[in-house]
């Protein structure tokens, strides 16, 4: 199964991150992370040059073009973690997460040297709830803090290069990312969550389809699944309940239950709104 946070190489040597779990026949929805280019300044462990792609977009890639595939739970770096990264890994184990439910994605999965951080993914809805209950203890034990205002501003500017800042106030949505830990000024680490294979259902479908543009305001009824991909949460508006879905990375843990939010998106049926265009967004109201 092509699962969120898996990585693959295409026939040109470009590297992609899989987004979501449900894909059209013959294709995989993914984002190019690294473009192979001799002018690139990012080198892997074999001396290949790459340019990192920052745009928060996604593409449909033919399965026929995939030449090698990497899954987070099979990351070789899991056997050689050291320092801070080993401490984070051990903190997840000590919190009650089983070893087989922990993986590493990001550049470390595809044979790049660790320059900035190691990205961890934890599988299982129950484990997300488990970590959430213990996140403050985890941060305290590791000597980390919540994400700082300065780092939130930095991330808001980064995502703002792709998204519509008139539709999303990132300084508020990013403040809701409870699984992000500030290691030192300028470096944070976010625990990401994925579904186990048996948890994947048709409810995770966030594919584009005909609809109409809509702006709607409501109260967030649940926030748990905004920590997964697609980001999913429900809002109540004028007595109706709507399900919001987006595959954009920027909206990890973007809302909290009880918050008032304005959604700019596409209504694709009576009760489902997709945020799948850079003009769409999530605006948290005071």
Image (cartoon, helix red, strand yellow):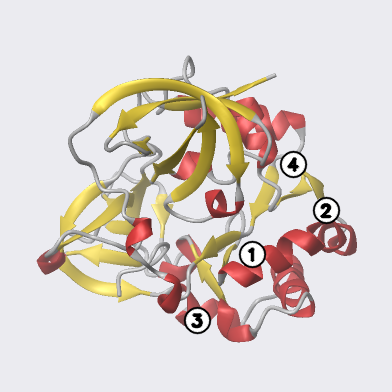
Mark 4 to mark 2 CA distance (whole Å): 9 Å
Marks 4,2: beta carbons within 8 A: no
Secondary structure at numbered mark 4? loop
Lower sequence index among marks 3 and 4: 3
Which residue carries the number 2 mark? 144
Q: Position of residue 283 (x, y in %)?
A: 55, 23
Residue 215 position in % (x across, y down) = 41, 19
Q: In front: 150, or 253?
A: 253
Mark closer to the chain start, 2 or 3: 3
Res. 49 image quadrant = bottom left
First-in-chain label (2 vs 1): 1
Q: Residues within 10 Å of mark 3 (few under 14, many from 20)?
A: some
Q: CA distance from mark 2 to mark 1?
A: 19 Å
Determine which residue is flagged by label 3: 76
Gap between marks 3 and 1 measured at Cα: 24 Å
Q: Which residue is mark 4?
A: 147
Q: Distance from label 2 to label 3 (Cα)?
A: 26 Å
The answer to whether 230 is drawn above or below residue 7 in the figure is above
- Sequence-wise, the earlier of marks 1 and 4 is 1
């Amino acid at each position: 199964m092509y699962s969120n946070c898996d990585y693959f190489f295409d026939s040109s040597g470009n590297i992609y991150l899989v987004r979501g779990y449900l894909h059209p026949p013959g294709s995989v929805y993914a984002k190019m992370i690294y473009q192979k280019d001799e002018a690139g300044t990012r080198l892997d462990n074999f001396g290949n040059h790459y340019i990192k792609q920052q745009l928060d977009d996604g593409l449909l890639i033919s399965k026929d073009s995939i030449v090698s595939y990497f899954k987070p739970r099979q990351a070789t770096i899991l056997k050689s973690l050291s320092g801070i990264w080993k401490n984070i890994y051990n903190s997840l184990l000590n919190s009650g997460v089983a070893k087989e439910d922990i993986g590493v994605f990001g550049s470390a999965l595809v044979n790049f040297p660790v320059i900035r951080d190691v990205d961890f993914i934890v599988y299982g809805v129950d484990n997300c709830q488990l970590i959430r209950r213990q996140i403050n203890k985890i941060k305290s034990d590791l000597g980390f803090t919540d994400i700082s205002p300065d780092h939130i501003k930095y991330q808001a500017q980064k995502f703002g290069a792709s998204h519509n800042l008139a539709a999303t106030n990132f300084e508020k949505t990013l403040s809701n990312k409870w699984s992000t830990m500030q290691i030192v000024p300028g470096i944070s680490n976010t625990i990401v969550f994925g579904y186990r294979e048996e948890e994947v259902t048709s409810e995770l479908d966030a594919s584009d389809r005909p609809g109409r543009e809509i702006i709607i305001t409501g109260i967030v009824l649940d926030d748990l699944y905004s920590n997964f991909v697609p980001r999913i949460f429900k809002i109540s508006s004028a007595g109706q309940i709507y399900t919001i879905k987006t595959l954009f990375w920027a909206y990890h843990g973007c809302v909290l239950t009880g918050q008032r939010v304005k959604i700019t998106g596409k209504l694709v049926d009576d009760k489902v709104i997709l945020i799948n265009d850079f003009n769409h967004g999530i605006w948290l109201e005071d």
